[in-house]
Image (spheres, rainbow, N blue to C red):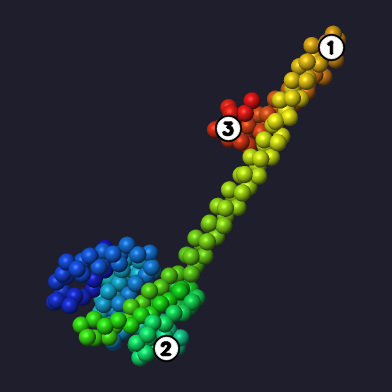
Amino acid sequence: MNALVSSSQGGVMTAQEKVSLALLDQLASCVLLLDESREIVILNTAAETILEASAARLGGSNIAQVIDLDDTLDSLLSQALENNYPVVKRELDILLRGGQRFCVDLVVSPISLEQAPHLLLEFNPVDRLHAISEDEHMWQAQASLRQIIRGLAHEVKNPLGGIRGAAQLLARELESPTLREYTDVIMEEVDRLRALVDRLLGPRNAFILA
């Protein structure tokens, strides 16, 4: 989606602008460019998603019409513009005019475009970063658990072959059918345990281990 709201050349984008905006739209971070009056000049697709509005709709709007400018956020914007130096705020709570609330990591960078001061806002929802981190931890825990189960299954399965073989040899030595019933029970239980272990190991490993 086109992230450009207004262009320096009467609404006609240059090739360089098109490339720059295409790159902005590939970023996962939400990016907004404000002019000195804090009106939205540019926003990328990620920002459109989080703000739940298109660039065409938000173009020219004051940031205060989109985000509740509390004392903290207002101070950050003023500080960056007055000192001409980037400011960073971690885990900042922002409230959209639509009522949605987010916790974000915010970077405000002052830049000069056509000799006019602008502010570049980049923010990432912390909730999303935490979710990614939690998913990664969960995946690692599941991988570790699978490794433990696989190791345990091998430890259980390896002696089962010896037990079954010993039961078969014993059955051949026994002349009494009644006694051979006990060895049959042993082999049946061993086979049941081997089938259970095969299910734990998964179909790819079931045929590898004898």
The residue at the far bottom in this view is 82
Whole-Å distance between the Cαs marked 1 and 3?
Answer: 35 Å
Q: Could you tell me how far apart the alpha carbons at marks 2 and 1 are, in whole angstroms?
A: 92 Å
Mark closer to the observer (2, 1): 1
Residue for badge 2: 75
Quarter of the N terminus within the rendering: bottom left
Q: Nearer the viewer, residue 134 or 88?
A: 88
Determine which of the numbered discs, if any, sits on residue 174 in the image: 1
Q: Is residue 73 left or right of residue 171?
A: left
- Pointer 3 and pointer 2: residues touching (CB < 8 Å)? no
Q: Residue at x 74, y 20 (%)?
A: 165
* Residue 34 pos. (x, y %): 30, 80
Residue 111 as seen in the image, left or right of residue 139: left
Q: Earlier in the sequence, mark 2 or mark 1?
A: 2
User: Do we see residue 113 in this rendering?
Assistant: yes
| Residue 59 x, y percent position in the rendering | 26, 76
Tell me whether circle 2 and circle 1 mark residues in contact (CB < 8 Å): no
